[in-house]
Each structure stands twice: as structure tokens, then as C-alpha cells.
Image (cartoon, helix red, strand yellow):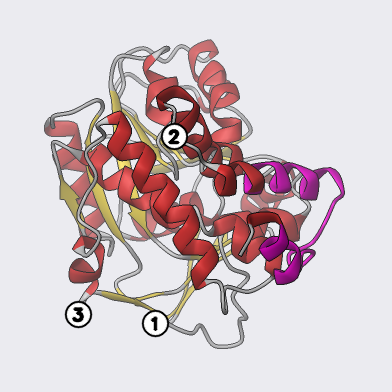
């Protein structure tokens, strides 16, 4: 049975690592900083609406230290701004044609990975989770912790997709194998355009007009580029009876991955690869994307200033976007 090497043990990687490990799968995590120390000392706690569970699994500081095996399955769970550095580490560690799965937001990771490795797969995540404190991850989905789509990049499926989907489903993350997984990832990208909005304001309340403007720009550039995108109601239909965002006792949800990065003072956010992806497509295809471009610039400023979530007012945004 293959070992799952999880590069990036944060909100997503930590949730997946804990569930796979506790389902009896061989897991090796790759982490850094305080998270690495805590995982080595005492393991990882996953808190969910259904209760808490703890897992202990080997953890390395790098792929080189991990000692990659020919039959490893690599799950890439870092944010996109860290993807290229992670890929270079994997190449230096001797990775060749092991399957590499991108459990990440945005649509740039798979193309980046395909420059280095031939066996690349996309994974779309519906998995609301927070990572703010070392040694603990909180996931808010119930009764299932998350729902995933899996497929080869740029298209098709293979036995590695089927094997991962089976392992994740058995671990409590129902997963579908799809030959057009990127259509799912582009739909998720439209949702993630709002990450910076909630992070900047500190809340998603009353942001419908702003989100609609960002989404409309995204849909326009995807149409101009001829990109296939899943229907808007697919995710909602999948969630029925399987997953809804629920409260975890004693926990106040931080919000999107962007809000978490600002809250931790991580020094970077992934907005360049979310709203920035829409700005890029707009420039390539001659479609104006002023709102997404503005939020991309705003995210960079918030990082430079070390701002916490909630540093921007609705009035500032309304003035900038002409709302």
C-alpha cells in the first residue's frame, strides 16, 4: 500500500493527514517552524463538529529528509505562493513520476507542477478548515468533513485517482473521480474570489454586491478564454445531506485561508493566484477586471503593512469600486 506524503500540514494538509492516518493509512507529513516541532512532540489534533481526534505520524522538515519512495503518493497542500519552492524541493529530493496531487485553491498549481513532473493531478476542495495555532486544525464540515473532486491534469483519470478517492472516502472525505476536474477548480476559483473581501473587512456580512462584481468579472474572463466551468449549483446539490458548515464547540471561525494568513502574520497571501488569476486572464483576453485587480493590489498592501483581518472599511471598498 502506498504511503501518503503530505507536503504542507496546515488547514487542508492537517485535516487530510489526521483522517488518513486514523483510517489506518501510512502518512508522512512535511512541515516547518513551530508546526514541525509540535507535530514531532505530540502530534496533531483535529477538532470538528462531530468531536475531536488526535493523530501521530512521522514528520519531516523537507522532502529530502522524508526520503521519497518510488511508490509514494504526494499530496501538495501548500498555498500557491509556496508551490514553486515546494516543487523544487521535491525535484531535489529525487521525485520522478510519482503521482502529485494538488490539494490547493486556484488553478495555477497544476500547470506549475507539470513543468517539473509528468504525473500531475488536480483536486478540488470543499473543506472549510482553520489553521491558526500550531498542533491544532479545526474543520467545520458536518456530517462529512469535506467533499473532493479528483482527476489528472490537464484531463482524464487513472488508477491513482481512483485509489486516492477510495482512501479519502474511507477516511470520511467523500471524493469523486472526474476527467474534467479543472472545470470544478475554476468554479471553486469563482467562490474564492471573495476570500480577500472577508479578510479585508473581517466579516462576509453585507458583501453581496462586492462579491457579485468580482464573480461577474471572473465569469466574463473565463467565457472569453473559452474555459469550461462547472454549473453554479453543482456544489450545493452535492452538499445536501453530506456537508454543511457547522459550529465547533468553543471555537470562533477565523474565516478563509486569506484571513487565516493575515491573522497568523504569515507574510504572504494567495490572492495573487485567485483574484490575480482573473486579472491575468482579463489582460490576456482584453476583458476589464478592475475590481479583481484592485483587490489583488489591496492584498499586497495589507501584507506589507502587517494588517490583521478587518483593516479595511466597506466605505473604502465602495469608493474604490464605484459602488
Q: Is residue 8 above or below residue 190?
A: above
What kind of secondary structure does the magenta stretch mostly adopt? helix
Residue 172, given in percent of the width and then of the height, sits at 27, 65
Between 215 and 188, the residue placed more toward the observer is 215
Q: Residue furthest front?
A: 322
Left or right of residue 157, residue 114 in this image: right
The answer to whether one can see residue 278 in this image is: yes
* Between marks 2 and 3 in the image, the one whose residue lies nearer the viewer: 2
Where disc 1 sits, the SS reads: loop
User: How far apart are labels 2 and 3 at the CA level?
Assistant: 39 Å
Residue under circle 3? Answer: 241
Residue 241, given in percent of the width and then of the height, sits at 19, 80
Residue under circle 2? Answer: 287
* Between marks 1 and 2 in the image, the one whose residue lies nearer the viewer: 2
Where disc 3 sits, the SS reads: loop
Q: Quadrant of the C terminus?
A: bottom right
Residue under circle 1? Answer: 50
Residue 199, given in percent of the width and then of the height, sits at 65, 62
**Which of the 4 quarters of the picture holds residue 33?**
top right
Q: Which residues are magenta?
A: 295-319
The answer to whether one can see residue 46 in this image is: no
Q: Residue at x 31, y 21 (%)?
A: 98
Q: Residue at x 33, y 43 (%)?
A: 186
Residue 45, given in percent of the width and then of the height, sits at 55, 66
Question: Which label was assigned to residue 102?
Answer: none
Amino acid at each position: 500500500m502506498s504511503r501518503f506524503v503530505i507536503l504542507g500540514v496546515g488547514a487542508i494538509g492537517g485535516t487530510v493527514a489526521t483522517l488518513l492516518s486514523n483510517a489506518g493509512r501510512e502518512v508522512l507529513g512535511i512541515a516547518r517552524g513551530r508546526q514541525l516541532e509540535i507535530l514531532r512532540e505530540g502530534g496533531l489534533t483535529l477538532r470538528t463538529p462531530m468531536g475531536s481526534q488526535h493523530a501521530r505520524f512521522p514528520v519531516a522538515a523537507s522532502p529530502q529528509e522524508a526520503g521519497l519512495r518510488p511508490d509514494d503518493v504526494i499530496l501538495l497542500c501548500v498555498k500557491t505562493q509556496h508551490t514553486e519552492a515546494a516543487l523544487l524541493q521535491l525535484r531535489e529530493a529525487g521525485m520522478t513520476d510519482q503521482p502529485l496531487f494538488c490539494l490547493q485553491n486556484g488553478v495555477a498549481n497544476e500547470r506549475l507542477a507539470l513543468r517539473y513532473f509528468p504525473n500531475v493531478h488536480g483536486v478540488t476542495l470543499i473543506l472549510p478548515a482553520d489553521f491558526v495555532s500550531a498542533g491544532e486544525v479545526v474543520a467545520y464540515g458536518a456530517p462529512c468533513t469535506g467533499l473532493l473532486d479528483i482527476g489528472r491534469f490537464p484531463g482524464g483519470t487513472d488508477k491513482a485517482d481512483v485509489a486516492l478517492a477510495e482512501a479519502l472516502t474511507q477516511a470520511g472525505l467523500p471524493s469523486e473521480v472526474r476527467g474534467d476536474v479543472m472545470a470544478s477548480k475554476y468554479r471553486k476559483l469563482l467562490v474564492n474570489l471573495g476570500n480577500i473581501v472577508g479578510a479585508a473587512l473581517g466579516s462576509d456580512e453585507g458583501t453581496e454586491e462586492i462579491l457579485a462584481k468580482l464573480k461577474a468579472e471572473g465569469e466574463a474572463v473565463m467565457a472569453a478564454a473559452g474555459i469550461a466551468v462547472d454549473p453554479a449549483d453543482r456544489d450545493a446539490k452535492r452538499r445536501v445531506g453530506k456537508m454543511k458548515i457547522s459550529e465547533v464547540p468553543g471555537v470562533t471561525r477565523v474565516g478563509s485561508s486569506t484571513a487565516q494568513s493575515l491573522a497568523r502574520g504569515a507574510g504572504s497571501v494567495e490572492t495573487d493566484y485567485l483574484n490575480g488569476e482573473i486579472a491575468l486572464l482579463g489582460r490576456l483576453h482584453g476583458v476589464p477586471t478592475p475590481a479583481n485587480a484592485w483587490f489583488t493590489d489591496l492584498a499586497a498592501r495589507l501584507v506589507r503593512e502587517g494588517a490583521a483581518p478587518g483593516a479595511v472599511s466597506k466605505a473604502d471598498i465602495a469608493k474604490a469600486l464605484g459602488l
